[in-house]
Each structure stands twice: as C-alpha cells, then as structure tokens.
Amino acid sequence: MMKKKLFALCMAAMLLLAGCGGGNSMASGGAAADMSAPSAELDWNGQDSWEMEFPMESESQLSGDVYQNPRAKLIRRAELNIQTEQFDQSLEALNQLVNSCGGYFETANLYGGSRRDAYSSRSGDYTVRVPAEKYDQFLSGTGDLGYVTSKNESSEDVGERYYDTEARLKTQRTKQERLLALLEKAESMEDIIALESALSDVEYQIEQYSSKLNRYDALISFATFQVYLDEVGRVTQEVGETASLGARMAAGFQASFRNLGQGLQDFLVWASYNIFLLVILAVAAAVAVVVGKRELKKMKRQNEPDKKSDE
C-alpha cells in the first residue's frame, strides 16, 4: 500500500515538473516569436530609390466600428436645406451658431434682395467648417434656423490612404538623409550631379506628400457643412401618405385656397406691370363692340326694305 502511494506521489511530481517545463518553453517560444516579429526596414533596391517595409496589421485591429477605431481618420460632411420666413434673423442665428462652435465660413453666397429685386425672395448657400468635436452641436443647432426640409450626412474613413501617405513621406525623408550623407562623401563631379538630381526628386516627393497630409489633417479636424437657406412666404409642412384621409383632404382644401389667393395676387402683380397693354386691349375691345353694334344695326335696316318689297 505504501509503495502504491509513493508511486502515485512520484508520478504527480513528474507531471508537475513536466507542466512547468512546458509552460517555460511556451513562454520562451512566445518571447522568441516576439523578437522575430518583422520591423520597419529600409532596403536599397539597386537603383536610385529606397523601399520601406512595414508590418501588416492583423484583421482584429482593422475590424470593428469605424467610430470606435482609434486609427480611423474620418472626414465628416453634412448637407442641409432650410426654409425660413424670416431670412435676416435666420442668417444672424447662423452666424452666431458658427461662432459659438468655433467654426468659420469657407464660402458664403447670397442671392436676391438687391436694389433691382428688393422684394424678391432671397436665398443663400454657405460652406461652413466646424471643429470635428463640435459636429453634433452644430448639427442640432441648425434646427433653430428654420424648417429643415432635407438633411444628408456622410463620413469617409481615409485612414488607409493617410497612413500610406505618411509611410511614403517617412521613406522619402529617410532617403533624403541617406542621399545627403552620400553627397558629403562624394568626390567626383559625376556623382555629385547624380546625387543632387536624386535629392531634387526626393524633395519634390516630400513636398507633395506633406501637402497631401496637411489637406487630410484639415478635412479630418474640421467637419464640412453645406447649408442652403431659402426665404419663403409661408413655411408649410406637407401631409404625408401615411396620414388619415381627413387630414389629407383638409390639407388639400387649404392648399387649394392658398393657391387661389396666390394666383390672384400674381395676376394683380402681372396686371400692374402690363397696365398700358391692358388699357390698349380694353380700348380696342370697346371700339370693336361699338363698331359691331353699328354694323349690326345697318344690316337690320337694309333687311327691313327687302322684307317690305317681298310683301
């Protein structure tokens, strides 16, 4: 009995030691794997350019919601069409909203309201740039400008292009450093000319990539809003197809009366612009009526003697 217990204890000890040894080998293997991971290296391709290799990201790093991905580079845009009955107040509110969000107007165009058409309806289109962190604040604030008839939002993740451009820029700067070092050691005029030509090309590439990254940074850090503001005489909310029959019929009658009143107003305005033409037409119509009556009387008088002679 004692021998069996001793044998069991020995076996347990051997298994424990084997497990510890396996764990240590796995840990050392993991460390070795980490040490052997690929790193960024520069490689001369035998001609006049350098190539840089970077480790690829795992799929787990690239998957997930783009808004929660820390490597995402989002360009956010929105387009809004807004109707207002008080254009001046809405425009002032838009200015205040832009200032409160720390943004600015990239473009601003106003149509109508000039001396020639002082009483025409006005409209404006504005390109507004707002810090990306103020996107939701500005978007919610546009509801106070008037009646939002349409709203379109879009987000574009340019992370892949951004990091690719960043890597290419780093490669070109490293190449520039190497070329400068070679230029200091160059002795023959032929080598100096070749190195300076290569440096000129590298500097051009650096300028192009830097400009591209700066443009990306500007678009990412500031969201873009396209706001279309239209002045209307009356803001009306259309009844949709899902409304009840009574609501749709009531809306139809109201629209008919509004159209009738608007049509009468438009006719009066047209008449005021064409008053002289209307007067001439009225005089011509009156002359035609008078002449027609006279001719009709003459025809009657001529017909009366003919009737008497026949009798």
Image: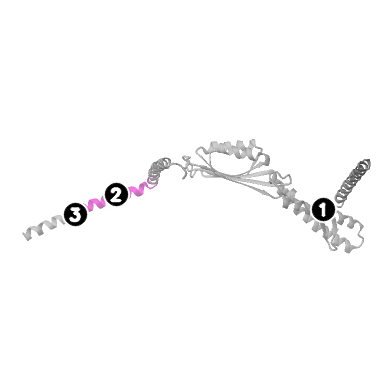
Using the image, tell me which numbered label, if any, was put on residue 296: 3
Q: CA distance from mark 3 to mark 1?
A: 103 Å
Instruction: Indicate the secondary structure of the residue bearing disc 3.
Output: helix
Q: Give the residue drawn at x 30%, y 48%.
A: 282
Left/right of residue 288 with respect to residue 126 in the rendered view: left
Judge by depth and name the residue closer to the eye, 164 or 63.
63
Residue 287 located within the stretch drawn in magenta? yes
- In this rendering, is residue 160 above or below 83? below
Residue topped by disc 1 = 173
Q: CA distance from mark 3 to mark 2?
A: 20 Å
Amino acid type at mark 2 = Val
Residue 171 located within the stretch drawn in magenta? no
Instruction: Indicate the secondary structure of the residue bearing disc 2.
Output: helix
Disc 2 crowd, CA 10 A, few/some/many (<14, 14-19, 20+): few
Amino acid type at mark 1 = Arg
**Residue 257 x/y as whole percent:** 38, 41
Q: How many marks?
A: 3
Closer mark to the observer between disc 3 and disc 1? 1
Q: Give the residue drawn at x 64%, y 45%.
A: 224
Judge by depth and name the residue closer to the eye, 71 or 222.
71
Start and end of the magenta stretch? 271-294
**Residue 152 x/y as whole percent:** 58, 46
Residue topped by disc 2 = 283
Q: Earlier in the sequence, mark 3 or mark 1?
A: 1
